Amino acid sequence: MTADLKPHERRQQRTRQAILDAARQIISQKGIDGLSLRGIARAIDYSPAGLYEYFGSKEEIVHAVADEGHLRLRHAMAAVPETDDFVADMAGLGHAYLRFAAENPDHFLLMFTILPQYACAEDGMSEMMGEKSAFPILLQAAERGVREGVFATREEHGPLEIAFTAWFDIHGVAMLRLTQLNCLPSDVLDRLTDLSMRNMMRGLMAE
Amino acid sequence: MTADLKPHERRQQRTRQAILDAARQIISQKGIDGLSLRGIARAIDYSPAGLYEYFGSKEEIVHAVADEGHLRLRHAMAAVPETDDFVADMAGLGHAYLRFAAENPDHFLLMFTILPQYACAEDGMSEMMGEKSAFPILLQAAERGVREGVFATREEHGPLEIAFTAWFDIHGVAMLRLTQLNCLPSDVLDRLTDLSMRNMMRGLMAE
DNA sequence: TGTACATCAGTGAACGCGCGTTCACTGATGTAC
DNA sequence: TGTACATCAGTGAACGCGCGTTCACTGATGTAC
């Protein structure tokens, strides 16, 4: 993907990435409100004006960081190995989601919170199905679950609906753990998380 | 609760409330980043310095607005009437939650997003069980569901665990609808929401 | 190989802005005698 | 009832700050002949 570039293009790419990495790191340390062009520039030994060579505005940088986050989340979930035990694999996907949220809380909040002002694509579904989103990974798992007869399907209730149900549940867990339940001891949280995931699976299962 | 106050105390209370109302309205219109002491002061015809008679800092105001939000959400859910049909009542609670989120998106995001830096109470559970939280309403419903034999219980899986499962699901729906799925047509969203709630209930039910 | 020129990445200073907070103040309201 | 004083709610101007963005610039790198 990054092959076939002339040297100066590679240098550009590298600088662009350095900007995004610095931005991500600053967000991790000080939250989204702590992010400033001046801070990014300081981190990569540039003048603030220099950033405008690579991005048109601060907002563009923030969007790029969020996009990158979605990609990283997708990769984290895609990296969950597939075993014979579908139910366990499904739980593994959920835990990958939660681990990402726990390890990158401010990045996660940025991705799933701050930017509702995106222009809507005319087909709202297409963005979610794209390569930048983790949803297709979940959808694939739902399809496998159906194929293996673990999940029940009915009229108007196929893999897509199953994937959404799972996403809703795991996303709620992730958000509430970050923002409301962070005072609870983590063993309690883990127990509640597991129960919730199990209940959710139970609601989707055949028979 | 507001009785037994001397006139000047009532006046103070009213001003305090006016500040919070203005803050809430500004947040609704311009988001949390659009909130400034100057803006609040302008809205209630005060000088910015005057606000310090009522709150010690901007942060205090923001926390107060968030707290008020939790109270309003609780009231919205407590106002859902109880009928003979438990399952329908449970769905009603979910819809009250979602309606609140949809009608007060920025307020909702403030409540459930921005302020993870609260000092943790030594017992993390107590705040959630308090009068400022909507969770007890959900817990009551879960207890009723158990009492009526709709929800299954097992070892280590009682009303509390049921309430959490429901909260996770409905909160995930609310957050994703606000931040990721706002491009989908609302009939699609409503269908997915209902399916998810039904699946969740199914996972909790007896037999 | 050497020279003239164009392109490019990055700088430094400045722009105007809105912010939270402080502080000395004022004028009205309440209290004591 | 009148007067002196204390309290209180609210003001206005100023503080220092950090911000995103612009723009004329510079020095290095690349290109053409």
Image (cartoon, coloured by chain):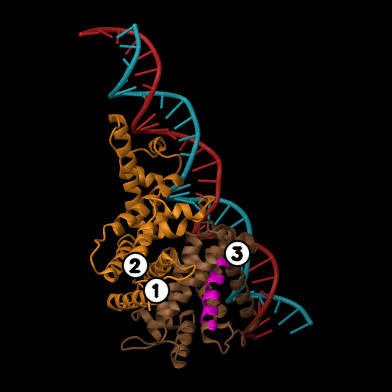
Chain colours: A orange, B brown, C red, D cyan
Asked whether the residues under marks 2 and 3 belong to the same chain, the reply is no
Decide whether the magenta segment is chiefly helix, strand or loop. helix
Answer few, some or many: residues within 10 Å of disc 1's Cα (few below 14, many 20 plus, some between 14 and 19): many
Tell me which corner region of the image, top left, top right, bottom left or bottom right, holds residue B119: bottom left
**Can residue B56 be seen from the camera position used here?**
no
Secondary element under disc 1, as helix, strand or loop, is helix
Q: Assign the N terminus of chain B to one quadrant of the image.
A: bottom right
Residue C27 coordinates in the image, percent (x, y):
69, 65
Asked whether the beta carbons under mark 2 and mark 3 sit within 8 Å of each other, the answer is no
Circle nearer the viewer, 1 or 3: 1
Q: Which residues are magenta?
A: B88-104
Chain designation of label 3: B
Secondary element under disc 2, as helix, strand or loop, is helix
Asked whether the residues under marks 1 and 3 belong to the same chain, the reply is no
Residue A141 falls inside the magenta stretch:
no
Answer few, some or many: residues within 10 Å of disc 2's Cα (few below 14, many 20 plus, some between 14 and 19): many
For label 2, the residue is: A145
Residue B42 coordinates in the image, percent (x, y):
63, 59
In the depicted view, which residue is nearer to us: B22 or B12? B22
In the depicted view, which residue is nearer to us: A94 or C9? A94
For label 3, the residue is: B25
Q: Amino acid at mark 1?
A: Leu
Chain designation of label 1: A
**Can residue B149 be seen from the camera position used here?**
yes
In this view, the residue farthest toward the bottom is: B147
Asked whether the beta carbons under mark 2 and mark 1 sit within 8 Å of each other, the answer is yes
Residue C21 coordinates in the image, percent (x, y):
48, 61
For label 1, the residue is: A204
